[in-house]
């Protein structure tokens, strides 16, 4: 909660719901309202068309309403999700022009560096504050983690040495007990008994025990101190099981589909072979998600495939949680491991009342991978996901041997992953087309 300000405006991450004041904004004819609409490319026909708008167009409407309200504090959650590169540049300039206090939640490195003057990182339940822009904060955090790793490695090495010493001291104590025991001394062997009594009297029987206790104390203290150092978890998904390769290539016949009442998308014959990684790019509203839905409906694929849509509704998230709860213990164990290797705690996620869209996406991906799909279809997979998870997912998909089709506005993700690209472009006033780039 932010106190001490008259008006705080929050622009949500999800694009599921229509902004409360959208209609009022669209019917406001002030100079400022028109400026915002022009800045974000808002069209008159978008009013009342929320259900058929792309998520990128919805995001621009969300931001337009947020900018229009006269706020002291503007809180924006992942403002560049769903946006093409042109729209991202527009949003950046709009956020730069904001005169109040801006609170930005984002995993867009370019946006963060361009806007941030202070950075807050949340890592492993810890809040870390930096008085610098994101890239400097990230560098400082990396250096800190590197130092912690060095300390942890040294502690682990020392702990192993102490562990060996504890074992040696235990053996000494055991031998001492045997030496000072009268159990095996003859009944009339008074000389040996006197010798043992002398050793006990001078404290020789206690010395080894004291050394053992001291060494064990050092072991316990070092072990407790290691608990304060951040743990590192293995990242990256390995795809187990054989990928079914017959049934490829998968083809889509040349056709045209309607996007809006008067706008259509036309595409040539397209095919996907096993091992292909097809990256789909293009401006907002070009029909990328519509094409993927058409593809999923029309293609008669013979084997398991995984399709993750661009946005997951609250109802779909609840249904997902119910499905996960019905999995066997072994399946849950495998699922939790996959989610953890994407940088999250699956058990904590399932207990949360309001999970983030990024966390739900990781759970959905992990559950789908349990089926060992031969084809993976991802619509904006990097939306809502943190940087570590994006890099982990990217590396994992590079190693995937099945077929992959993905939509993205993340240029780095697209270039690092795709073996060929389908580019959606506007050819005529009301027509978009698809061009294959190898």
Image (tube, helix red, strand yellow):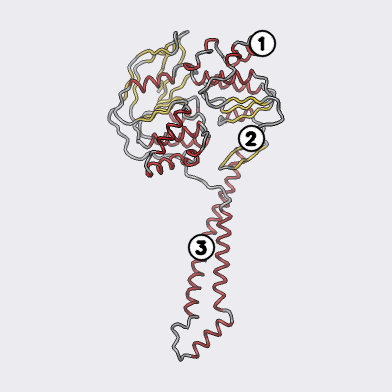
Q: Where is residue 13 in the image (x, y as percent from the top left)?
A: 55, 27
**Disc with the residue nearer the chain's start (3 vs 2):** 2
Q: In which quarter of the image is the C terminus?
A: top left
Q: Is residue 314 above or below residue 298?
A: below
Secondary-structure class at tag 2: strand
Q: Where is residue 186 in the image (x, y as percent from the top left)?
A: 44, 88
Residue shown at 46% from the left, 13% from the top = 426
Can the viewer see residue 343? Answer: no
Secondary-structure class at tag 1: helix
Q: In this view, does 61 lie above or below 194?
A: above
Residue annotated with mark 2: 119
Q: Where is residue 421 in the image (x, y as percent from the top left)?
A: 42, 23
**Disc with the residue nearer the chain's start (3 vs 1):** 1
Can the viewer see residue 406? Answer: yes
- State the CA–CA distance, disc 1 to disc 2: 34 Å
Secondary-structure class at tag 3: helix
Local crowd size for mark 2, using a 10 Å CA cut-off: few (<14), some (14–19), many (≥20): many
Q: Position of residue 393 (x, y in %)?
A: 46, 35
Residue annotated with mark 3: 163
- State the CA–CA distance, disc 3 to disc 1: 74 Å
Q: In which quarter of the image is residue 330?
A: top left
Residue shown at 37% from the left, 28% from the top = 276
- Label 3 with label 2: CB-CB less than 8 Å: no
Residue annotated with mark 1: 31
Q: Nearer the viewer, mark 3 or mark 1?
A: 1
Residue shown at 51% from the left, 62% from the top = 163
């Amino acid at each position: 909660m932010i106190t001490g300000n008259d008006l705080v405006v929050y622009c949500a991450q999800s694009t599921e719901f229509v902004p409360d004041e959208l209609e009022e904004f669209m019917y406001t004819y002030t100079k400022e309202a028109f400026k915002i609409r022009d800045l974000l490319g808002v069209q008159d026909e978008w009013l009342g068309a929320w259900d058929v708008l792309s998520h990128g167009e919805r995001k621009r409407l969300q931001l337009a309403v947020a900018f229009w309200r006269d706020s002291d504090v503007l809180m924006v959650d992942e403002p560049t999700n769903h946006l093409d590169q042109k729209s991202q540049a527009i949003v950046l300039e709009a956020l730069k022009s904001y005169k109040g206090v801006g609170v930005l939640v984002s995993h867009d490195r370019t946006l963060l560096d361009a806007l941030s003057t202070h950075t807050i990182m949340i890592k492993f339940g810890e809040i870390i504050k930096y008085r610098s822009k994101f890239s400097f904060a990230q560098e400082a955090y990396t250096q800190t983690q590197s130092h912690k790793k060095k300390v942890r490695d040294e502690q682990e090495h020392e702990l192993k040495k102490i562990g060996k010493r504890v074992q040696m001291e235990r053996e000494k104590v055991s031998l001492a007990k045997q030496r000072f025991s009268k159990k095996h001394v003859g009944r009339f062997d008074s000389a040996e008994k006197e010798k043992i009594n002398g050793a006990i009297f001078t404290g020789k029987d206690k010395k080894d025990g004291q050394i053992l206790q001291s060494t064990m104390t050092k072991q316990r203290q070092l072990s407790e101190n290691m608990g304060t150092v951040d743990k590192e978890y293995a990242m990256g998904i390995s795809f187990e099981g054989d990928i079914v390769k017959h049934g490829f290539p998968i083809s889509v016949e040349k056709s045209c589909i309607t996007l809006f009442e008067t706008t259509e998308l036309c595409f040539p014959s397209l095919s996907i072979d096993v091992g292909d990684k097809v990256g789909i790019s293009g401006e907002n509203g070009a029909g990328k998600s519509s094409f993927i839905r058409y593809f999923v409906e029309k293609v008669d694929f013979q084997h398991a495939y995984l399709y993750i849509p661009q946005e997951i509704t609250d109802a779909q998230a609840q249904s997902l949680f119910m499905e996960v709860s019905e999995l066997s213990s072994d399946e849950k164990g495998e699922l939790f491991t996959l989610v953890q290797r994407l940088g999250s705690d699956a058990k904590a996620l399932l207990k949360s009342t309001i999970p983030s869209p990024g966390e739900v996406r990781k759970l959905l991906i992990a559950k789908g991978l349990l089926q060992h799909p031969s084809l993976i279809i991802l619509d904006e997979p990097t939306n809502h996901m943190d940087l570590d998870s994006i890099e982990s997912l990217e590396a994992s998909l590079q190693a995937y041997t099945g077929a992959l089709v993905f939509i993205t506005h993340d240029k780095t993700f697209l270039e690092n992953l795709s073996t060929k690209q389908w580019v959606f472009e506007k050819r005529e006033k009301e027509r978009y087309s698809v061009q294959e780039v190898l």
